[in-house]
Image (cartoon, rainbow, N blue to C red):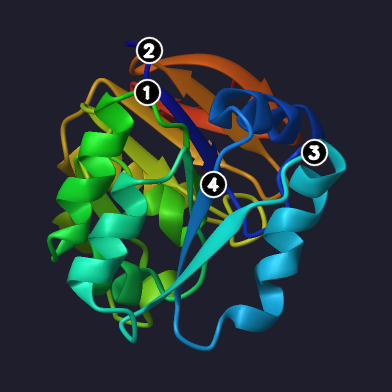
Amino acid sequence: MNKHLFLFGGGSPFTSEFARKFVGLSLGGNIAILYLDGGEPIIPRYTNLLELYGQYTFTHIPLPSTSVEEASNLVENSTGIIICGGDSIGYADHIVDTPISEAVRVAYEKGIPIAGFSAGALISPEICVISARDSGRMEYLKRKGLGLIQDTLIAVHFSQWNEQDHLKQITAEISTTYNYGIDENTGLYVKNGILEEIEGGGVYTIKKGSLIQIH
């Protein structure tokens, strides 16, 4: 079973080609949208482009007001999952650190496509690293992630937030084979754990301490 993960460096919307691809992979079924309470007004920004490609069925799962049991059931019965952007610590608290994380992993292993935007992208790898700018703390915060991809570090809003030093620091202190700094309005498509396609703006990586633009 092929596994499909879309990682976006900013919040909504999808990039155009990845929206088309995501709709195709979800097979016209029900897409679950995970977001934090109060995020309802921005949900159309995630769904409008999908609707242009014929996707009309969505289940809204606000957290933590939706119970963990209900959220997990809705995720397990979806044919696509969107994890929205916003408070990265809040997403880690209410998804990664709850049984919802296992429901997401089970869906992913079954071939259900998952799209993570900003905070949703940050929590997707095995290791979730939230930058000081993002967390509002003096230094970056390292937490457990969903584990949808291994051996990979992600930084989001990369050029817009000037996160070059952040990516250099975490790659020096946390050993992984892959790392990506993703700009806003930019997405990575990872198939079976391997980066297959990039759409949008800039994507960067640190190799031997040097910043390299790969897209």
Mark 2 or mark 4: name the one nearer the start of the chain: 2
- Asked if disc 1 and disc 2 are in contact, CB closer than 8 Å, the reply is yes
Q: Using the image, determine if residue 194 lies above or below residue 128.
A: above
Which residue is labeled 2 in the image?
Answer: 2
Question: Observer-nearest residue: 54 or 167?
Answer: 54
Residue 185 pos. (x, y %): 73, 47
Where, by quadrant of the figure, is residue 53 drawn? top right
Residue 123 appearing in the image: no
Which residue is labeled 1 in the image?
Answer: 111
Image point 21% across, 36% down: which residue? 106
Mark on residue 186?
A: none
Q: Residues within 10 Å of mark 2 (few under 14, many from 20)?
A: few
Q: What whole-number distance in Å separates the C-alpha atoms at marks 1 and 3? A: 20 Å
Mark 2 or mark 3: name the one nearer the start of the chain: 2
Q: Using the image, determine if residue 215 lies above or below residue 46.
A: above
Which residue is labeled 4 in the image?
Answer: 30
Q: Residues within 10 Å of mark 1 (few under 14, many from 20)?
A: some
Q: What whole-number distance in Å separates the C-alpha atoms at marks 2 and 3? A: 23 Å
Which residue is labeled 3 in the image?
Answer: 54
Question: Observer-nearest residue: 19 or 122?
Answer: 19
In the picture, measured across the screen, residue 198 lies left or right of residue 189, that is right
Q: Using the image, determine if residue 99 lies above or below residue 190.
A: below
In the picture, measured across the screen, residue 184 lies left or right of residue 116, that is right
